[in-house]
Image (cartoon, coloured by chain):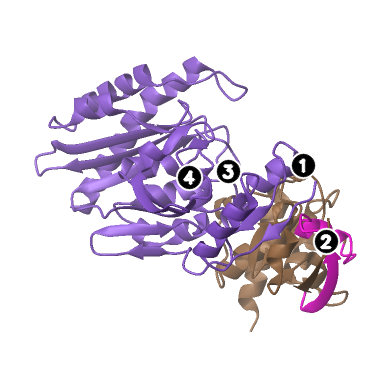
Amino acid sequence: MGFQLHRPDSVGAAIALARELGPEARYLAGGTDLIIQINRKRCAPGPLIALDRIAGLSGVAAGDGVIAIEAMTTLKTIERHPAFAGPLGALAEAARVVGGHQIRNVATIGGNIVNASPAADLVPVLLALDAEVELAGPAGARRLPLGHFLRGPGVTAREPGEVLLRVAFARSPAQTATAFIKAGRRRAMEISLVCIAAFLALDGEDRCLEARIALGAVGPTAWRATRAEELLRGGEASMAAFRAAGAAAAADCAPIDDVRASVEYRRRLVAALVPRALQHCRQRIAGGR
Amino acid sequence: MSRISLRLRVNSDRYDALVEPHWTLLQVLRGPLGLTGTKENCLEAECGVCTVLLDGRAVNSCILLAALCEDRDILTVEGLGRPGKLHPLQQAFIDHGAAQCGYCTPGMLLTAKSYLDEHKGVVPDPDAVREAIAGTLCRCTGYQKIVEAIRAAAAALKEEP
């Protein structure tokens, strides 16, 4: 092993370096996955372009209508940020269960997205928030929905030389809440067997104005359970309706058998945890009234 | 591959080292710097025995490139206390028998320090301590004595002027 390490101080310089160094070069964020893969010799150690010196690539900008999280923001920052204490609490809930403190002090939201693990914990929350990603590359900047960015396990729509700048989503209005639930054998240092994020908006009579459900680790990418969502929209926010949504999500998911859990077990988790996440949302909305 | 010259600040001491760009902080600490208190085990950030503090925050030194640590404050177990003036955490680990084989102890001490520094003046409940040290594994003690020691150290630190 052995590689060159570059530390540009601007996004423009990073993109220019990526162009010059060619397809072997990789961007380095927190490195909590990439450095392990290099140590295991599972990925060729081409030149690395560290993004840590670029000013402005870290932090949370909570504007009037939109919240933007810069790509190099650590999971610890998200876990502790006041913007994610209320209706957007699922983001802090998801950040808090990644690895241990040592990982969260270093790992970034950008890395969690670009790495495109089907089990990435923050990704379902961002999908449930209808988030968009913003990229910059040799051909300029662009934005696209996170759901279009994720293509498969470890595969994204990122073009050569493109760097993820930030992820953004609308601030939640009143009468909404989010929830995140992760199933694993222990609470820390665990890859999710299933992870579930829900966003719920209710009217004054407990009817669902909007429901968004996203699932991780039960398909090639994290995905939105749109059929389950449609079952809920316009209907009563009842436990029976939540269970029906859970059954639909369980029927539509595509988990794999692996050392951590079987297909059948993962489906049962989806059927049980989708209603629980929705119920958490409903209770949180009621608590905030 | 050509080596690069690196300026590191460890335990308030300055070190200059010639390192390969791909060397981790753990490799540099234990190799050229000779600071072998920080232990090496899984090399995958799973076990936490290599934990050091970087600008006061606990990190796994086994997956952190040393070259990214230039001009930052690194604290290892060698800088935590010294003979005759142990850190309250070290004293509490001795008093409570919180070390058995000792291999996780340096990482455990620094994991705990990072948590206590962040929650000054508070004696955490046992569940909070267990959550705080979740990223650092001990295969000997069953954690009970470690949790007790960390709470005792928090109480001792609270009494300090």
- Res. B139 mark: 1
Chain of the residue under label 4: A
Is residue B89 visible to us here?
A: yes
Q: Are marks 1 and 4 on the same chain?
A: no
Of the residues under marks 4 and 3, which one precedes in the sequence?
4
Is residue B150 visible to us here?
A: no
Residue at x-position 29% and y-position 52%: A87
Of the residues under marks 1 and 2, which one precedes in the sequence?
2
Front in this rendered view, residue B153 or B113: B113
Q: Nearer the viewer, mark 4 or mark 3?
A: 4
Around disc 2, counting alpha carbons within 10 Å, would you say few (fewer than 14), some (14 to 19), or many (20 or more)? Answer: many
Element type at mark 4: helix
Residue at x-position 24% and y-position 30%: A229
Disc 2 designates what residue? B28
Drawing shade for chain B: brown
Chain of the residue under label 2: B
Element type at mark 1: loop
Query: Magenta segment: does it hold B12?
Result: yes
Q: Which chain is purple?
A: A
Q: Position of residue B70 (x, y in %)?
A: 71, 70
Disc 4 designates what residue? A113
Q: Nearer the viewer, mark 1 or mark 4?
A: 4
Left or right: residue B149 versus residue A277 is right
Disc 3 designates what residue? A188
- Segment colored magenta: B11-35
Q: Are marks 3 and 1 on the same chain?
A: no
Q: Position of residue B80 (x, y in %)?
A: 77, 71
